[in-house]
């Protein structure tokens, strides 16, 4: 008799087909391990949800306590998944961290590049648009930003390399500024990466100080910093002034 | 750091005071950690490596440091203190902020190039050596901000006011530049970066033409 009941519940959970349960029922936001619920969730969706929860938990833990101090146990507990589920998706703690960096850095750099492409004004305006999106992303996701900009650098060669690669992708946005500098032949090859490094450093320092809320004022200042080597002081300050006005308006 | 002078003390009666011996052991442990980090990287270094290299017992290690991280912090501190002395000597007697800034930059780059293992320890390994070391690294870099900010006095008063974050972004750019050079395994060639570093430092305060001219002269 109990066998029947169990079978019935299992059928419910697997949408009737209990040999090949392609569909499982679960509450939204809490995937496959949950009791039967109204919405059927496909295996792919459940797996995607598990990955999202694992990465979010990893980000939150690393942002507050650093990578070295974050244990597997804390990640699975916070993500509300089992160890087996974790290992189904990621080989170890570092693999989850790298996946998190790839997703967050990839998304942010793509948005920054997109803002640069969509702005049709002169180069300095395009850099302003791109930098504005970067600052907005950091302000909107300070924890993830801290993980990408501060903790990644301190977490060994794998994560640090992801961070460096993202910086490298920003360099091509600055490079056209060389055309505006009469001494362009003398500018060092690495100038763009160096400036990007400066921007990331300042952002990181603000995040460490817990000042993600004060990034608005920093944006025009940083724009002035990256434009200055290309267009000179006056033009850089003028552009930064325009941006500062637009923000406060 | 004169690691070769830091061998074990002679056995038997040597006439050194207890304080002298303790100081000597501490210095040896720091030198041993630096050597071990240079050989295999901070993460892979074990306490056993450090005490073997220093030729002291674990008991002596724990009398001086609580952990590998604390020992690393001490090594980092030794290098930063030494750089501070070198910079002080380099700017002594030099007139004018811009020339002092160039001299200081040269002194730092020259030392790090001459001691590539220590350059690696400070700029690369320090990043992965735990939160305390990271915080100390940021502090050591920020210590330079007031020295840069003295360049503000070089600007004509009528000129637009430089943003407050100018020194921070400039220092961040310098750190990024040196970090990439060291990560590329070219720590010994750090001095090549002198014109580039000097120009970064001078640019906000002197403008592009003057910064470039002085940076070229600096080589």
Image: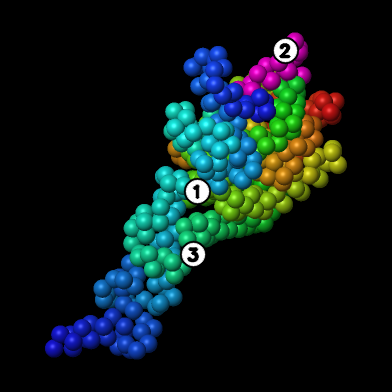
Residue span colored magenta: B79-100
> Which type of secondary structure does the marked residue at label 2 adopt?
loop
Whether residue A115 appears in this view of the structure is no
Please state the chain letter of the residue tagged with numbered disc 2 in the rendered image: B
- Asked whether A44 falls inside the magenta stretch, the response is no
Residue visible at 27% across and 86% down in the picture: A11
* Identity of the residue furthest to the left in this view: A1
List the residue tagged with mark 2.
B92
The N terminus of chain A lies in which quarter of the figure?
A: bottom left
* Relative vertical location of residue B91 with respect to residue A234 in this rendering, above or below: above
Residue A98 location (% of width, % of height): 53, 57
Label 1, label 2: how far apart the Cα atoms are:
42 Å
Residue visible at 78% across and 37% down in the picture: B189
* Identity of the residue furthest to the front in this view: B12
**Mark 3 or mark 1: which comes first in sequence?**
3
Picture disc at residue A91: 3
Picture disc at residue A147: 1
Label 2, residues with CA under 10 Å away: few <14, some 14-19, many ≥20: few
């Amino acid at each position: 008799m109990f066998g029947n009941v169990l079978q019935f519940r299992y059928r419910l959970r697997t949408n009737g087909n209990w040999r090949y349960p392609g569909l499982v029922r679960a509450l939204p936001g809490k995937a496959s391990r949950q009791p039967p619920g109204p919405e059927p969730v496909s295996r792919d969706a459940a797996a995607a949800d598990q990955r999202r929860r694992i990465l979010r938990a990893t980000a939150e833990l690393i942002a507050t306590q650093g990578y070295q101090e974050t244990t597997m146990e804390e990640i699975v507990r916070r993500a509300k998944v089992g160890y087996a589920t974790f290992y189904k998706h990621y080989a170890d703690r570092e693999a989850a961290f790298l996946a998190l960096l790839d997703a967050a850095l990839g998304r942010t750099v793509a948005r920054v590049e997109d803002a640069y492409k969509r702005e049709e004004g002169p180069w300095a305006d395009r850099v302003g648009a791109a930098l504005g999106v970067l600052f907005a992303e950091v302000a909107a996701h300070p924890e993830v930003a801290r993980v990408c900009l501060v903790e990644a650098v301190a977490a060994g060669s794998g994560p640090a390399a992801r961070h460096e690669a993202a910086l490298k992708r920003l360099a091509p946005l600055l490079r056209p500024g060389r055309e505006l500098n009469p001494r362009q032949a003398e500018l060092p090859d690495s100038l763009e990466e160096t400036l990007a490094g400066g921007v990331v450093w300042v952002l990181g320092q603000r995040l460490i100080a817990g000042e993600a809320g004060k990034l608005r004022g920093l944006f025009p200042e940083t724009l002035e910093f990256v434009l200055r080597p290309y267009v000179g002081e006056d033009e850089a300050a003028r552009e930064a002034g325009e941006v500062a006005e637009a923000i406060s308006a | 750091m004169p690691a070769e002078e830091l061998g074990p003390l002679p056995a038997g009666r040597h006439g050194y005071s207890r304080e002298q011996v303790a100081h000597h052991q501490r210095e040896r442990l720091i030198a041993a950690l630096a050597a071990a980090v240079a050989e295999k990287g901070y993460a892979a270094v074990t306490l056993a490596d450090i005490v073997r290299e220093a030729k002291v017992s674990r008991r002596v290690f724990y009398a001086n440091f609580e952990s590998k991280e604390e020992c690393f912090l001490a090594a980092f501190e030794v290098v930063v203190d030494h750089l501070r002395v070198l910079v002080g000597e380099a700017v002594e007697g030099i007139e004018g902020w811009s020339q002092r800034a160039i001299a200081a930059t040269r002194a730092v780059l020259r030392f790090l190039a001459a001691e590539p293992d220590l350059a690696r320890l400070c700029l690369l390994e320090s990043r992965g050596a735990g939160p305390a070391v990271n915080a100390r690294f940021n502090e050591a870099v920020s210590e330079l901000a007031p020295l840069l900010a003295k360049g503000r006095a070089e600007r004509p008063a009528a000129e637009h006011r430089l943003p407050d974050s100018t020194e921070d972004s400039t220092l961040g750019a310098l750190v990024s530049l040196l970090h990439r050079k060291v990560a590329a395994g070219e720590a010994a060639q750090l001095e090549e970066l002198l014109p580039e570093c000097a120009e970064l430092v001078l640019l906000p305060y002197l403008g592009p033409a003057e910064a470039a001219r002085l940076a070229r002269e600096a080589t």
